[in-house]
Every structure is written in C-alpha cells, then in structure tokens.
Amino acid sequence: MSEITVTVYTSAARINLCLSVKIVRVKVMYFFLINVSFAQTKNGRDTKNICHRVTQARKIIGPLNGVWWSKNITRNRKKMIHNSMVKSVLIYGAETWSLYEDDRRRINVTEMDALRRSARISKLDRKTNEYIRGKMDVQDMILDDITRKQLI
C-alpha cells in the first residue's frame, strides 16, 4: 500500500496529511481561521479581504498538488479534502462581502484550479469548467454557497 505524506504550511496552519489508498488520516497540529478585517474602500468594495482569502486558499492548493494529481486517491476523497481545507478557508467571512464581477471571477478561478487538479486535467487540455465539474461530480459552485450564506 503506497502512502503519501504532505505537510501544508500557511501563516495560520501546519497540517500533516497521511494519505493511503484506503485510509485518509488528517492530523491537525494547530489550525484556526483568522479573519483579517480590512476596512471597505470608499466605494464599499471588499476586494482586499477577498484577495486575502483567495491567497490563503491558494497557499493550501499548491502544496497539495501531489494529492490532487494522485491516481491512488479517489475523487470522493479529493472532494472531501477540497471541501474541508480549500473551500472552508476561501469562504470564511463571506457573509459580509459585497461581491463584484472581478471578485466573483477570482473566487471561481481558485475553485476551478483545485477541481482541475483533482480531475487530473491540465490547463493545456482546454476543458470547460462545466466538463470539469461534471467529471468531479460537483453541482454547486462556491459562489452559490456564498450567496446562500449571505441569504440573498
């Protein structure tokens, strides 16, 4: 049984993952979400806060590249990792965001980056987002979850 060990370092977390074909064990050394509150700009945009969340999510996506591209880990397991590590960090504090089109694009690109890697599809393959969501069996986008959290 092959085992993959990945250590993720971010400014807020150190997470050790030991993954094997049949078992996924997540050992959290310490993990907490820091809501860095940025004041809204004069025009009422939350772009700094959203960019911070996207950066934190990308810091988690990058070191997990070996997990995303692994053939030994099932898609369901990858979706669980995506939901628990990437999605939770990305949408933390989203209830108060005022989203504009460029903010929506940033969030969507980050989500699709993780899903594309999980589906083992390169950007050079030029597959659509709908194709990748279908392959990963993901119906809702993160933007839908944000809208639900905002009760809009």
Image (cartoon, rainbow, N blue to C red):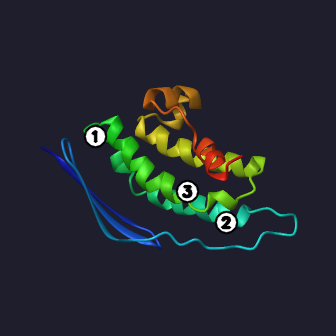
Mark 1 surroundings within 10 Å by alpha-carbon count, few (fewer than 14), some (14 through 19), many (20 or more): some
* Residue placed most toward the observer, 122 or 137: 137
Q: Position of residue 71 (x, y in %)?
A: 29, 36
Q: Amino acid at mark 1?
A: Ile
Q: Position of residue 48 (x, y in %)?
A: 70, 66
Q: Which mark sits nearer the N-terminus, 2 or 1? A: 2
Q: Is residue 67 left or right of residue 87?
A: left
Q: Which mark sits nearer the N-terminus, 1 or 3? A: 1
Please name the residue shown 75% across and 73% down the image. Answer: 39
Say which of marks 2 and 1 sits in front: 2
Residue under numbered circle 1: 73
- Determine the image quadrant of residue 6: bottom left
- Determine the image quadrant of residue 72: top left
Residue under numbered circle 3: 90
Q: Secondary structure at mark 1?
A: loop
Q: Which mark sits nearer the N-terminus, 2 or 3? A: 2
Q: Amino acid at mark 3?
A: Leu
Q: Is residue 48 above or below residue 80?
A: below
Pointers 2 and 3 in contact (C-beta within 8 Å):
no
- State the CA–CA distance, disc 2 to disc 3: 10 Å
Q: Is residue 43 above or below residue 4?
A: below
Pointers 2 and 1 in contact (C-beta within 8 Å):
no
Q: Is residue 128 among the parts visible in the rendering? A: no
Mark 2 surroundings within 10 Å by alpha-carbon count, few (fewer than 14), some (14 through 19), many (20 or more): some
Q: Amino acid at mark 2?
A: Asn
Residue under numbered circle 2: 49
Q: Secondary structure at mark 2?
A: helix
Please name the residue shown 65% across and 61% down the image. Answer: 51
Please name the residue shown 40% across and 42% down the image. Answer: 79
